[in-house]
Image: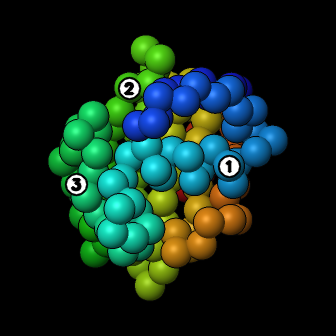
Amino acid sequence: MKLRTNFPYKISVEIDVANNPDLAGELLRNAFFDQSEGRGCYVSFKLRDNVKELPSKIIDGINFHYACAEFDGKEITMEYWWDGDGSLSFIFEDGCAIQNNDCKKTYNWKFYSKEEMDRKLER
């Protein structure tokens, strides 16, 4: 899967998300969160103007937050929650996703194929 998007600085990039999840995750974090006062989803939770906040859900006592944004005509959904550590995910229209289970870090992003995501949702 490739992600091509325009970020607030109007730079277009094409990233092979499966092979560069750390880069893709941090670029998307910046595209979704205003990070002028700190790392998005860790210090700052202010969403950028082009990001639409969606209703949150409480599952097993954990508050899951959602938002979405469109990049090059494709919608990407963001999901984050805190269960001791913060987790941040970006879910693509084709069902693939990248996730960081300790969102204070800028690394350890993991790519999940649609099949892997389907198996995770079955549990």
Distance between mark 2 and mark 1 Cα atoms:
19 Å
| Left or right: where 79 falls relative to 58 | right
How many marks overall? 3
Please determine whether, in this image, residue 96 is positioned above or below residue 112: above
Indicate the quadrant containing the N terminus: top left, top right, bottom left or bottom right.
top right
Q: Residue at x 64, y 29 (%)?
A: 13
| Left or right: where 71 falls relative to 120 | left
Report helix, strand or loop for mark 3: strand
Q: 57 or 72, which lies in front?
A: 72
Instruction: Please state which amino acid type lies under the numbered disc 2.
Output: Glu
* Residue found farthest to the bottom: 84
- Work out whether residue 81 can be spotted: no
Residue 58: name its quadrant: bottom left
Q: Going from the N terminus, do you reach mark 3 or mark 2 first?
A: 3
Please determine whether, in this image, residue 113 is positioned above or below residue 4: below
Q: Position of residue 48 (x, y in %)?
A: 28, 45
Instruction: Please state which amino acid type lies under the numbered disc 3.
Output: Ser
Marks 3 and 1 in Cβ contact (< 8 Å): no
* Residue found farthest to the top: 73
Which is more foreground, mark 3 or mark 1?
1
Circle 2 residues within 10 Å: few <14, some 14–19, many ≥20? some
Q: Which residue is mark 2?
A: 70
Q: Which residue is mark 3?
A: 56
Report helix, strand or loop for mark 1: helix
Q: Going from the N terminus, do you reach mark 2 or mark 1 first?
A: 1
Residue 113: name its quadrant: top right
Q: 45 or 83, which lies in front?
A: 45
Q: Which mark is residue 23?
A: 1
Instruction: Please state which amino acid type lies under the numbered disc 1.
Output: Leu
Marks 2 and 1 in Cβ contact (< 8 Å): no
Q: Residue at x 22, y 54 (%)?
A: 56
Distance between mark 3 and mark 2 Cα atoms:
19 Å
